[in-house]
Image (cartoon, grey):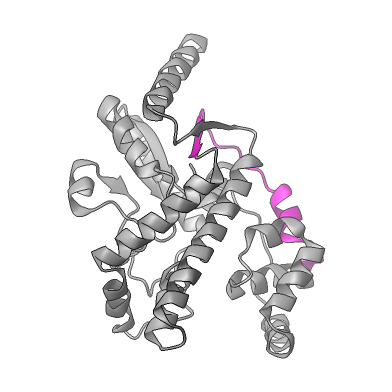
């Protein structure tokens, strides 16, 4: 677990070199075919040598939910247990991790009347105003939801309007313990400036590899720009550039800013989880420290059984 650009995939592959594991991706962008560069998906050679489940399972036009992820991940975990392998879940979509461990609340169904009311309010006052209202009602949800994520802002407020209960309170009332011993390993740089530097460097590499051309190919499929896949960090900003709404430099600036904000939200989730064991990804040989920790923890768990 960790923020974007922290080195999760590289660490997972090193772990796979040392112990029998089954790799399961926990990334809401990497599930989509054709979204390779902008999601920092392992390349073809890496996937051949280190197969990951839940990568390239859908077209960008197809919907996918956290509940679907949970059900698929649980089946894969059982499969690997039967093969005497340890499931190793790697990624940065924190909501998927939470859904897997605790389940999902039974939320009220969508209400078209409430939805239209919220859309009208957004048209009159802007989505920022709705995000601010959400922050007053449910600070936890507002912190997790990007102010530009209209779909999630609308749904969070809709849940409150219908039930009178905030999404965070619904989540607190839903706990379905996972029948597994869980070891949560979080990696991120102790110095945030180093993470920001890595984010900028990785973005430049993405452009060199053809990120803009990748988005052009998706755009040629006439995909709805409001699809969750097309609203992903980086893709949304490049689409704005291709549509002539912003300059190249402004697009680049927005990509960096949005990625930093994503990393900030991911770190907030991780720091609020007392079960996460943290490793500084910028320390020399940090991978060896992680591997030593896993080995020691596994030995303790085996002794306790």
Q: Nearer the viewer, residue 122 or 197?
A: 197
Q: Quadrant of residue 290?
A: top left
**Drawn side of residue 144 relative to residue 23, left or right:** right
Q: Determine the residue positioned at 71% across, 85% down.
A: 113
Q: Residue at x 63, y 48 (%)?
A: 268
Q: Nearer the viewer, residue 162 or 246?
A: 246
Question: Is residue 98 depicted above or below 255 in this figure?
Answer: above
x and y percent of residue 43 in the render?
23, 53
Q: In which quadrant of the rendered view does residue 175 lie?
A: top right
Q: Which residues are magenta?
A: 162-188
Instruction: Answer left or right for 134 relative to 35.
Output: right
Q: Position of residue 224 (x, y in %)?
A: 42, 83
Q: Identify the residue at the far top of this view.
A: 303
Is 215 part of what is drawn in magenta? no
Q: Look at the image and say whether residue 167 sits in the magenta stretch.
A: yes
- Residue 39 in sight: no
Q: Residue 15: in sight, yes or no?
A: yes
Query: For this rendering, which residue is in front, 59 or 190?
Result: 190
Return the x and y of residue 278 as percentages of the image width and height.
54, 32
Q: Residue at x 54, y 41 (%)?
A: 191
Residue at screen point 39% across, 71% down = 62
């Amino acid at each position: 677990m960790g923020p974007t650009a922290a080195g999760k995939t590289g660490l997972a592959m090193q772990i796979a070199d040392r112990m029998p594991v089954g790799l399961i991706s926990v990334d809401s962008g990497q599930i989509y075919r054709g979204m390779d560069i902008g999601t920092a998906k392992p390349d073809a050679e890496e996937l051949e040598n280190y197969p990951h489940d839940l990568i390239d399972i859908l077209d960008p036009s197809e919907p996918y939910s956290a509940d679907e992820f949970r059900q698929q991940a649980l089946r894969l975990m059982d499969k690997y247990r039967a093969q005497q392998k340890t499931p190793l879940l790697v990624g940065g979509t924190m909501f998927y991790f939470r859904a897997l461990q605790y389940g999902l609340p039974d939320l009220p169904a969508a209400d078209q009347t409430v939805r239209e009311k919220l859309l009208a309010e957004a048209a009159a006052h802007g989505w920022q105003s709705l995000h601010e209202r959400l922050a007053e009602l449910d600070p936890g949800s507002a912190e997790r939801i990007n102010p530009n994520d209209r779909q999630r802002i609308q749904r969070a407020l809709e849940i409150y309007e219908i039930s009178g209960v905030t999404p965070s309170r619904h989540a607190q009332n839903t706990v379905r313990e996972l029948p597994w011993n869980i070891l949560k390993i979080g990696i991120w740089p102790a110095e945030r400036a180093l993470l920001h530097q890595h984010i900028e460097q990785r973005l430049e590499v993405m452009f060199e590899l053809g990120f803009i051309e990748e988005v052009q190919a998706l755009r040629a499929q006439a995909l709805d720009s409001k699809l969750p896949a097309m609203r992903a960090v980086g893709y949304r900003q490049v689409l704005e550039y291709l549509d002539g709404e912003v300059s190249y430099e402004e697009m680049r600036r927005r990509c960096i800013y949005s990625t930093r904000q994503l990393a900030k939200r991911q770190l907030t989730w991780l720091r609020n989880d007392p079960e996460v064991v943290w490793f500084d990804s910028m320390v020399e040989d940090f991978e060896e420290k992680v591997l030593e920790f896993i080995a020691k923890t596994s030995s303790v768990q085996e002794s306790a059984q």
